[in-house]
Image (tube, helix red, strand yellow):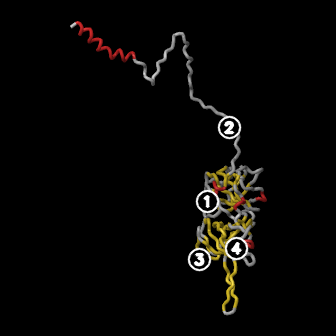
């Protein structure tokens, strides 16, 4: 009985002794600090704003493809020049309206036929009958604006075929063929072809004009509405002769609609100060006209609003 009394407690406490003598697990670590080591200093952290100067960045050039969906290719002609342009005469089948991927036929004025060969332009823009653009203050005709409809690629040359019938030589006109590669509106017979100048600008560097420039919006391009919004094109009554260049950023200043003080029985005339309501990027200029893309706006733009240097 005594043997069993002393042996039983040893075996009862043996698992606990083995557990206490085991090494600590690999994922844990026991550290100790001796009493002679100094206490580490206490650091108080507070949220705050830190600023660092950035290197000066110039305005980067706008690649054509980045804003091309918002641009058009308006062109200004004089009446004689437009009447001498090649014209679309029709297409196969009975359709009278044409769009992208259609093949159409065109003729030039006599003595200036389409002939495929080295140096002959393959890309042509398509335009519709021009309309006169006048200066609102002087009434001067600043140019004849033709509506841009799309682009076409020359596929085959224009020529004349001769055949014999009843001993007579007959001549048959073979019109040039074009594939419509881009269309923003429906195209029809009678529309004109003008040599495309895709290299006129490949990129625009936005910049402020040198000196004070001012122009008036005389038309909203390609739209019959009275108000223009962001990403629409407006026509200005100033051009390259007045100093406007592609890339100029202009501030839009609206004419205030408040003219009279209706709260005063005397109805005195009012002339509120004109503020900036947006900006527009000039992308195409002619001698007396310019085209600008509205890039930012807070109020609708109307004909008669002014664009000035920022």
The answer for how far apart the CA atoms under marks 3 and 2 are is 62 Å
Image coordinates for residue 212, horizontal then vertical, percent: 76, 51
Residue under pointer 2: 54
Image coordinates for residue 281, horizontal then vertical, percent: 68, 54
- Quarter of the image that includes the N terminus: top left
Residue 239 or residue 255, whichever sits in front: 239
The answer for how far apart the CA atoms under marks 1 and 2 are is 40 Å
Q: Residue at x 77, y 50 (%)?
A: 210
| Few, some or many residues within 10 Å of mark 1 (<14, 14–19, 20+) | few
Q: Residue at x 68, y 35 (%)?
A: 53
Q: Earlier in the sequence, mark 4 or mark 3?
A: 4
The answer for how far apart the CA atoms under marks 2 and 4 are is 55 Å
Residue under pointer 3: 92
Furthest residue toward front: 3
| Few, some or many residues within 10 Å of mark 2 (<14, 14–19, 20+) | few
Q: Which of marks 3 and 1 is in front?
A: 3
The relative height of residue 192 versus residue 4 in the rendered view (above or below) is below
Q: Earlier in the sequence, mark 3 or mark 1?
A: 3
The answer for how far apart the CA atoms under marks 1 and 4 are is 34 Å
Disc 4 is placed on an element classified as loop
Residue under pointer 1: 227
Disc 3 is placed on an element classified as loop
Furthest residue toward left: 1
Query: What is the number of the mark on residue 142?
Result: none
Residue 206 or residue 132, whichever sits in front: 206
4 and 3 marks in contact (CB < 8 Å): no
- Res 220 → quadrant: bottom right
- Res 133 → quadrant: bottom right
Residue under pointer 4: 86
């Amino acid at each position: 009985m005594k043997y069993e009394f002393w042996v039983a407690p040893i075996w009862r406490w043996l698992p606990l002794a083995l557990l206490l003598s085991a090494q600590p697990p690999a994922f844990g670590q026991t550290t100790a600090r001796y009493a002679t080591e100094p206490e580490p200093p206490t650091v108080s952290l507070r949220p705050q704003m830190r600023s660092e100067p950035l290197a000066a960045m110039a305005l980067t050039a706008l690649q054509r493809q980045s804003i091309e969906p918002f641009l058009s290719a308006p062109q200004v002609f004089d009446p004689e020049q437009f009447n001498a342009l090649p014209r679309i005469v029709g297409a196969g089948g009975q359709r009278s309206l044409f769009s992208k991927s259609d093949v159409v036929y065109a003729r030039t004025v006599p003595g200036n036929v389409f002939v495929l060969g080295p140096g002959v332009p393959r890309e042509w823009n398509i335009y519709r009958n021009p309309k006169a653009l006048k200066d609102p203050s002087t009434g001067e005709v600043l140019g004849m604006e033709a509506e841009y409809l799309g682009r076409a690629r020359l596929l085959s040359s224009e020529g004349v075929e001769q055949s014999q019938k009843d001993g007579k030589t007959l001549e048959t006109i073979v019109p040039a063929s074009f594939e419509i590669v881009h269309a923003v509106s429906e195209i029809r017979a009678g529309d004109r072809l003008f040599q495309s100048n895709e290299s006129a600008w490949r990129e625009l560097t936005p910049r402020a004009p040198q000196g004070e420039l001012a122009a008036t919006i005389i038309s909203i391009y390609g739209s019959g509405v009275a108000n223009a919004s962001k990403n629409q094109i407006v026509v200005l009554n100033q051009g390259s002769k007045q100093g406007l260049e592609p890339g100029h950023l202009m501030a839009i200043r609206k004419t205030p609609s408040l003219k009279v003080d209706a709260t005063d029985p005397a109805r005195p005339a009012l002339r509120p100060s004109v503020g900036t309501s947006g900006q527009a990027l000039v992308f195409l200029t002619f001698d007396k006209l310019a085209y600008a893309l509205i890039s930012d706006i807070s109020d609708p733009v109307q004909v008669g609003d002014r664009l000035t240097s920022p």
